[in-house]
Amino acid sequence: MRTMTDTFTLSHLDALESEAVHILREVAGEFEKAVILFSGGKDSIVMLHLALKAFAPAPLPFTLLHVDTGHNFPEVIDCRDQMVAKHGLRLYVVSVQEYIDAGTLHERPDGTRNPLQTLPLTEKIQAERFDAVVGGGRRDEEKARAKERVFSLRDEFSQWDPRRQRPELWQLYNGRHAPGEHVRVFPLSNWTELDVWQYIAREKIELPEIYFAHEREVFQRNGMWLTAGAWGSPRADEVVEKRWVRYRTVGDMSCTGAVNSAATTLDAVIVEIAASRVTERGATRADDKMSEAAMEDRKREGYF
């Protein structure tokens, strides 16, 4: 028998959705010019879904921004462009390749461009005078991200100082900032990877097929299965083979590994994630394995 208490009890996904919608509306109310980071990856797709839901039936009050490394998975870029066109949104794309061509940035010996995103991102924020930048970072992903508040202040150089974190009691968010400063906002802070996938299943959100198991030519490097691409090819001692794999997270192809998987459906992915004891970034992102403080160092410099 249902009681009145049961009637008004939210599921954990309802509670997370409500919190994220509240945060997004706070951003719209507190800031003059906000932008959402949107790459076409699962977290940014969920973020866009929540933002559209938060302001429906009105148009989205934010523009989108993607820092394109030039080494992105084609499936993800295609999904990004399709979603932007579908919802009639404005997307800024900042190219790392253009910075390399201009001599402002230089290729790294390891071929990865993820650390090279910082300068294009911070210069675009300053050029457009964005005062809030919304991202899909979650605390369960990585140690440095676990330190972030929902509203995270950045100075005039886009740098992060953990000592300037502000208290956020009772879901009260302080967006105050001086001229030149901006705030990074993380509406998915309290979500886990499993929450994201369960929400995707509930809301029937479309994702790039790369997130599901498929046969792909890969080679192993530093314990990860990588895909050859514009970023580089296998070395002489690295053997290319066909495997059934899927990607738990997507980024620069040079440092994002696939995992062996037979999960071709949402339900199968959810079962797989529920059984995993390693975070998606810990399992498949080489750029986070450079040092214990790799992510925190990049965040201090302005990375997301």
Image: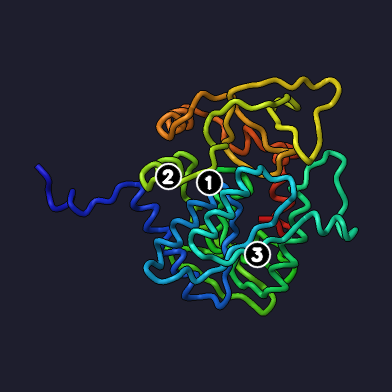
Q: Secondary structure at mark 1?
A: helix
For residue 14, above or below residue 258: below
Residue at 66%, 42% (x, y): give it: 73
Chain-order first, disc 1 or disc 3: 1
Which residue position holds label 1? 42
Chain-order first, disc 2 or disc 3: 3
Type of amino acid at the residue the image marks with label 1: Lys
What percent of the width, then of the height, locates residue 129? Answer: 67, 75
Would you say the residues marked 2 and 1 are in contact, meaning their CB atoms lie under 8 Å apart?
yes
Which residue position holds label 2? 200
**Quarter of the figure with residue 37:** bottom right
Q: Secondary structure at mark 2?
A: helix
Name the one closer to the observer, 263 or 154: 263
Direction right: furthest residue: 103
Which residue position holds label 3? 92
- What's the distance in space between the residues labelled 2 and 3, CA to CA? 25 Å
Type of amino acid at the residue the image marks with label 2: Ile
Q: Please state, as top left, top right, bottom left or bottom right, where the N terminus lies in the image.
A: top left
Name the one closer to the observer, 240 or 49: 240
Q: Secondary structure at mark 3?
A: strand
